[in-house]
Image (tube, rainbow, N blue to C red):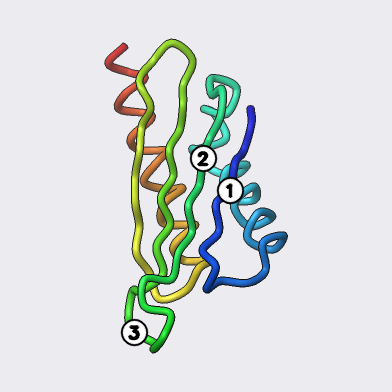
Amino acid sequence: MQLILHNDDALHGYEAAEARVRKELDKGAMKGFLDAMTRIEVWIADENAQKHGANDKRCTMEAHPMNLKPVTVTHHAPTVNEAIAGAAEKLAKALEHTIKED
């Protein structure tokens, strides 16, 4: 499975973000789906980089399961790590629903 990470210019620490995404994808319910994916694309952004605000970090994950349409989720949180964790949890639930239907 290929992991593609798109990082907002306002956020720093690409390597740390990539490591955090991999950690979240490799644990819990999401781990059971990784072999069925061709790729997962992740976009991390600070929607309000000029000033601090609640839930202004956004993580969007788009999973590409083999032979199925892509599944996309978004999670907003106060920190990048929380946004990544929330998006990974949502993605696992969405994939569970999508793959069970197929």
Counting every numbered tag in the picture gives 3
In the rendering, which numbered label is found on residue 5?
1
Q: Tell me which numbered mark, 2 or 1, is placed earlier along the sequence.
A: 1
What residue did someone put label 2 on? 41
Q: Amino acid at mark 3?
A: Gly
Q: Is residue 19 left or right of residue 76?
A: right
Q: Position of residue 24 (x, y in %)?
A: 57, 50
- Based on the displayed image, in which of its 4 quarters is residue 20 positioned? bottom right
Q: Position of residue 6 (x, y in %)?
A: 55, 51
Whether residue 22 is situated above or below residue 51 in the rendered picture: above
Q: Amino acid at mark 1?
A: Leu
From the viewer's side, name the closer residue of 9 and 44.
Answer: 9
Q: Position of residue 33 (x, y in %)?
A: 52, 27
The residues bearing labels 3 and 2 have C-alpha atoms spaced at a distance of: 25 Å
Whether residue 101 is situated above or below residue 45 in the rendered picture: above
Give the SS element for disc 2: strand
Give the SS element for disc 1: strand
Whether residue 18 is situated above or below residue 82 in the rendered picture: above
In the rendering, which numbered label is found on residue 51?
none
Q: Are marks 2 and 1 in contact (CB under 8 Å)?
A: yes
Q: Tell me which numbered mark, 3 or 2, is placed earlier along the sequence.
A: 2
From the viewer's side, name the closer residue of 40 and 25.
Answer: 40
What residue did someone put label 3 on? 53
Give the SS element for disc 3: loop
The residues bearing labels 2 and 1 have C-alpha atoms spaced at a distance of: 6 Å
Residue at 34% over, 84% down? 53
Q: Are marks 3 and 1 in contact (CB under 8 Å)?
A: no
Q: Tell me which numbered mark, 3 or 1, is placed earlier along the sequence.
A: 1
Q: Is residue 77 left or right of residue 29?
A: left
